[in-house]
Amino acid sequence: MIERLQDLQLLDRNCFALMLVRRIRAEWLEFYATFFNAEKAAQNLTASINNNYNCFKTAATNHTTTKPVIAWTSYDAPSPYNNNTASWLLSSAPYKRILSTDAGATFFNGTNPSSFANPTDFAAAVATVNILIDESVTGSTFDAFLQNYNLSSISSLKFIKNKAVFREDGLVNPQNGRDWFGGAVAMDDAVLQDLIRAVHPELFRIDQYNWIRNIAKNESMQLLTSANCTAADATTPVPNRALNCSSLQAGGGGSGSGNAAASSHVASAALTTALGLFTTLAVLV
């Protein structure tokens, strides 16, 4: 347990998740399920998520020897309140390396320093990057992204030319709060599915997305409200947003609810409560 508590300190600056993408997070769900006598349901649920994740990982890593370079970046705006000056950052968070590699990409963090005081130096540093994920707090449109990074739409940078600029705000609430910090924490397979769609769109040819949307192609944010809660029973667990990887490989359409049988039929109300506690912990620690 001590090692796991220490792992909690390995959160990167956006507090999304633990360094070890699946193992630690899944074990926390099972840990909380113990208090609700829902251990078996938790084991079935995490096994379903992990098996689907591994299916996506195998498909992506074996798809082609071409591994596009992906960078996770952010723009830190200047502020008169703390005398902060503008900076452009490259993330080296271990969990992003794992996700990127599992999606069949090459994780980019090969520069020193990883923070730049001017956009020209930043642009030079990411000259080899094929796909960019912008994690900036502000700038939800492609035009805003270009402005934040002082770039042009006719830039020769690969991720601009190829329209491969993404953000993690595909699912938001009316206050613009990102589900990336909530729902995505508990659905690793759905996160990997999103990332594979960005890295190798030809693999499964998935049109739908959850959190990771392409702002260069004007993909919009999807609004989550109480209207999305359509279950007749308030204790019904939220279905997994991931498609069924095996069905996709077999040529089927797949569906989030179909994949998450454990979530829809095995998980109890107690496990739903445990999942809520787990998600809260992952966001707040």
Image (spheres, rainbow, N blue to C red):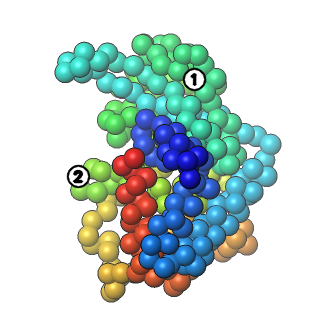
The CA distance from mark 1 to mark 2 is: 32 Å
Q: Are the residues at dot 1 and dot 2 in contact (C-beta closer than 8 Å)?
A: no
Q: In terms of depth relative to the viewer, which is nearer, 211 or 217? A: 211
Which kind of residue does numbered mark 2 sit on? Gln
Instruction: Give how far across and how far down residue 204 sits, in percent.
Output: 65, 60
How packed is label 1: few (under 14 Cα within 10 Å), some, or many (20 or more)? many
Residue 167 image position (x, y, % from top left) = 44, 43
The residue that label 1 is drawn on is 126
Q: Residue at x 60, y 73 (%)?
A: 43
**Image vertical order of residue 235 relative to residue 282, above or below:** below
Residue found at x 64% / y 44%? 98
Reply above or below: 4 against 189. above
Residue at 59% of width from left, 68% of height from top? 46
Residue sitting nearer the eye, 224 or 218: 224
Q: Image height check: is 239 above or below 101?
A: below
Label 2: state its secondary structure.
loop
State the residue position of label 2: 175
